[in-house]
Image (tube, helix red, strand yellow):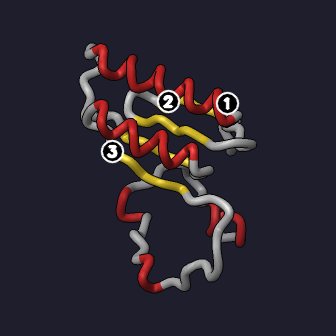
């Protein structure tokens, strides 16, 4: 088996046993002040959008899990509209990934609409 085959595998199928969850305490943290942080958020209602907006205004990127919101609820549309407005105001970007995630970026960060890797 060649080196690249070991990295990429020979067949495209993977299972959860092929992956290892890493404990961040085992790794060194970034020393000094980072220019931007990436936040993970869970959105269950309108109040959670405030924290996301604050983070984006502060120059941070947010990945928000919206699975707790009912898709037929008007709240989802309202939250997405608010976050879209914030992204526009700061010169950032926003994209919805599937039905369960929103990614909102700050000033100067654009989200590519093309996937990396093999088709």
Q: What residue sits 57% from the left and 59% below the top?
A: 37
Q: Earlier in the sequence, mark 2 or mark 1?
A: 2
Which is more toward the observer, 98 or 18?
98
Q: Is residue 74 above or below residue 57?
A: above
Q: Neighbour class for label 1 at 10 Å: few (<14), some, many (≥20)?
A: few
Mark with earlier residue (1, 3) = 3
Q: Quadrant of residue 112?
A: top right
Q: Which residue is mark 2?
A: 83
Of callouts 2 and 3, which one flags the residue occurring earlier in the amino acid sequence? 3
How far from the left and from the top, in percent, is residue 116? 69, 43
Give the CA distance from mark 1 to mark 3: 23 Å
Nearer the camera: disc 2 or disc 3: 2
Residue that numbered label 3 is attached to? 42
Which residue matches tag 1?
Answer: 113
Q: Nearer the viewer, mark 2 or mark 1?
A: 2
Q: CA distance from mark 2 to mark 1?
A: 18 Å
Q: CA distance from mark 2 to mark 3?
A: 14 Å
Residue under the image location 45 percent in, 85 percent down: 26
Classify 10 Å Cα crowding around label 3: few (below 14), some (14-19), many (20 and above).
some
Q: Is residue 119 visible?
A: no
């Amino acid at each position: 088996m060649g080196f690249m085959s070991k990295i990429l595998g020979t067949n495209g199928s993977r299972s959860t046993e092929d992956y290892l969850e890493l404990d961040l305490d085992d790794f060194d943290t970034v020393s000094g002040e980072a220019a931007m942080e990436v936040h993970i958020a869970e959105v269950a209602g309108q109040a959670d959008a405030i924290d996301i907006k604050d983070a984006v205004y502060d120059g941070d990127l947010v990945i928000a899990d919206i699975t707790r919101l009912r898709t037929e609820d008007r709240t989802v549309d309202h939250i997405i509209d608010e976050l879209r407005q914030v992204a526009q105001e700061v010169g950032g970007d926003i994209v919805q990934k599937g039905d369960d995630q929103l990614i909102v970026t700050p000033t100067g960060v654009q989200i590519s609409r093309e996937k990396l890797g093999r088709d």
